[in-house]
Image (tube, rainbow, N blue to C red):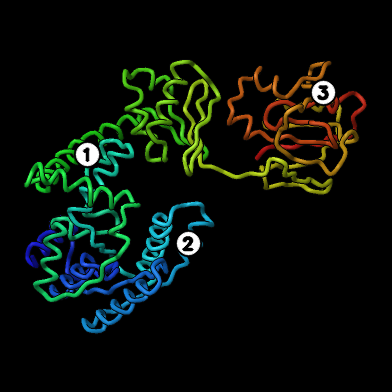
């Protein structure tokens, strides 16, 4: 097993003896065998143990066991206690997800501060097959059926070539007394249900089930790799990054018979699942514009011509920014230059959308910048009547994102400039204007 371990390390994890390895050590059979194997090949290794404070004395017993083990093997050990339940409640996530977030954030910090090359975890062949079925149950693309990768960034999983049984036999042979997490026996967790109830049925049907599944996942990984290359090609043709958002051309999407397949692969990296993609496809087919969809970290807008994906931002739409009379430049929330100009006989009005010019004596300082609100109206330059801002947006074919991004320049309660689009008739330069306030978008 030591020879097979070393071969797997070199072939699948790009290991070389000069690397500094951090082993995630829980005290269970998998992580203990992993650390023992690294020690046996004389690797430059150290361990990291998390106490999630979820199992009382059992958690403390794991910690003591790990400390004693590392002392016996002369392995440097990092330890960390976490308030896992508190973190889960604060962030509204499951205990499992909280523990995952906490440990990997700490591991990443250790890699950086201690200048270590990679993190090694004890994931094995059984874990990979369990993940296949969990993804299958929850719903996934072909990538989710490819099993766990042996290498992902700075993370390596050198035990993926071995089954849980082989690892436990290794521990017995080398007289390694490992700890058993009692929660691994509870059927409340999906992984445990798959492990203890579902997989044994397949093993009864096929004694070579584990090897068969490993072969299946390798084939699916090859198909996934080929498919991802195709998707990347499509992405380069169809997707444009613009001002922090992602634009996917609906014109390109319409060319595909299976729009859901293409969109799922493009959008799944941003957390949009199959159900959301199905609803999106339906809105495309029904030509519904302005519909929004949400994932954990992103917002998706189905516009007239594009699918727009942008990070979620919690903004206070009531926030107001002030511009005083003596200011010559404003950098936030938008970059503006302000200047006072004396009107001369040869003065010409700048008609650029990036410039606004007002009769200064009509302005009521401080001016303010804010977002639009329902019911807002102004008198667009050149018009004699007021117009609702919502109608102005429709007439000028503003997308939902355009409406959210636009800023209004106010004088008192009056909208004097839909910034970058149209100024107000009431504040225009006239025959009696002497001084002009010129505002330029930089």
Q: Are marks 2 and 3 in contact (CB under 8 Å)?
A: no
Q: Residues within 10 Å of mark 3 (few under 14, many from 20)?
A: some
Q: Contact (CB < 8 A) between labels 1 and 3?
A: no
Quarter of image, res 435? top right
Position of residue 188 measured from the top left corner of the image (x, y, whole percent):
35, 52
Sequence-wise, the earlier of marks 2 and 3 is 2
Give the left or right position of residue 176, taking residue 273 as reference.
left
Query: How many tags in the picture?
Result: 3
Of the two numbered discs 1 and 2 on the same chain, state the one appearing first in sequence. 2
Whether residue 396 sits left or right of residue 158 in the image: it is: right
Mark number displayed over residue 425: 3
| Disc 1, SS | helix
**Residue name at image x 24 percent, y 44 percent:** 132
Q: Residue at x 26, y 79 (%)?
A: 70
Query: Which residue is denoted by mark 2 in the rendering?
Result: 85
Q: CA distance from mark 1 to mark 3?
A: 59 Å
Q: Residue at x 72, y 32 (%)?
A: 373
Residue neighbourhood size for the residue with mark 2, other residues' Cα within 10 Å, grouped as few (<14), some (14–19), many (≥20):
some
Mark number displayed over residue 225: 1
Residue 48: x percent and y percent? 32, 71
Up/down of 26 relative to 99, above or below? below
Where residue 424 sits: x, y (%)?
79, 26
The quadrant of the picture occupied by the C terminus is top right
Labels 1, 3: front one: 1
Residue 117 sits above or below residue 284 on the image = below
Picture quarter with the N terminus = bottom left
In this view, the mark in front (1 or 2)? 2
**Of the pair 176 and 24, the residue shown nearer to us:** 176
Q: Is residue 426 left or right of residue 148?
A: right
| Measured Cα–Cα span from mark 1 to mark 2 | 38 Å
Cα–Cα gap, marks 2 and 3: 59 Å
Q: Element at badge 3?
A: helix
């Amino acid at each position: 097993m030591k020879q097979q371990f070393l071969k797997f390390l070199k072939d699948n994890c790009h290991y070389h003896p000069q690397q500094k390895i951090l082993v995630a050590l829980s005290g269970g059979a998998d992580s203990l065998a992993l650390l023992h194997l690294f020690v046996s090949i004389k690797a430059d290794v150290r361990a990291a143990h998390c106490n999630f404070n979820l199992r009382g004395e059992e958690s403390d017993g794991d910690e003591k066991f790990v400390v004693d083990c590392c002392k016996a093997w002369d392995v440097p050990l990092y330890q960390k206690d976490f308030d896992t339940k508190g973190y889960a409640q604060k962030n509204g996530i499951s205990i499992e997800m909280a523990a995952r977030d906490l440990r990997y954030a700490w591991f990443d910090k250790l890699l950086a501060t201690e200048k270590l090359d990679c993190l090694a975890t004890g994931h094995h062949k059984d874990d990979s097959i369990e993940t296949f079925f969990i993804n299958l149950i929850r719903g996934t693309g072909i990538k989710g059926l490819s099993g766990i990768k042996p290498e992902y960034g700075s993370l390596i999983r050198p035990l993926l070539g071995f089954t849980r049984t082989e690892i436990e036999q290794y521990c017995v042979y080398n007289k390694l007394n490992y700890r058993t997490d009692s929660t691994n026996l509870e059927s409340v967790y999906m992984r445990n249900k798959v492990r203890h109830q579902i997989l044994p049925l397949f093993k009864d049907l096929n004694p070579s089930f584990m090897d068969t599944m490993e072969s299946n996942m390798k084939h699916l990984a090859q198909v996934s790799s080929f498919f991802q290359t195709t998707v990347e090609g499509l992405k380069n043709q169809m997707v444009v990054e613009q001002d922090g958002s992602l634009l996917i051309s609906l014109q390109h999407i319409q060319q595909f018979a299976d729009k859901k397949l293409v969109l799922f692969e493009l959008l799944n990296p941003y957390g949009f699942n199959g159900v959301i993609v199905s609803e999106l496809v339906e809105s495309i087919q029904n030509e519904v514009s302005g519909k929004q969809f949400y994932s954990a970290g992103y917002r998706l807008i189905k516009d007239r011509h594009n699918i727009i994906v942008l990070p979620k931002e919690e903004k206070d739409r009531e926030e107001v920014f002030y511009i005083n009379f003596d200011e010559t430049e404003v950098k936030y929330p938008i970059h503006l230059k302000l200047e006072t100009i004396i009107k001369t006989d040869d003065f010409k009005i700048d008609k650029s959308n990036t410039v606004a010019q007002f009769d200064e004596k009509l302005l009521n300082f401080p001016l303010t910048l804010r977002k639009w609100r329902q019911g807002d109206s102004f008198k667009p330059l050149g018009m004699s009547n007021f117009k609702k801002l919502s109608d102005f947006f429709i007439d000028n074919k503003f997308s939902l994102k355009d409406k959210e991004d636009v800023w209004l320049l106010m004088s008192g309660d009056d909208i004097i400039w839909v910034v970058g689009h149209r100024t107000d008739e009431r504040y225009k330069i006239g025959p009696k204007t002497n001084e002009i306030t010129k505002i330029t978008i930089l």
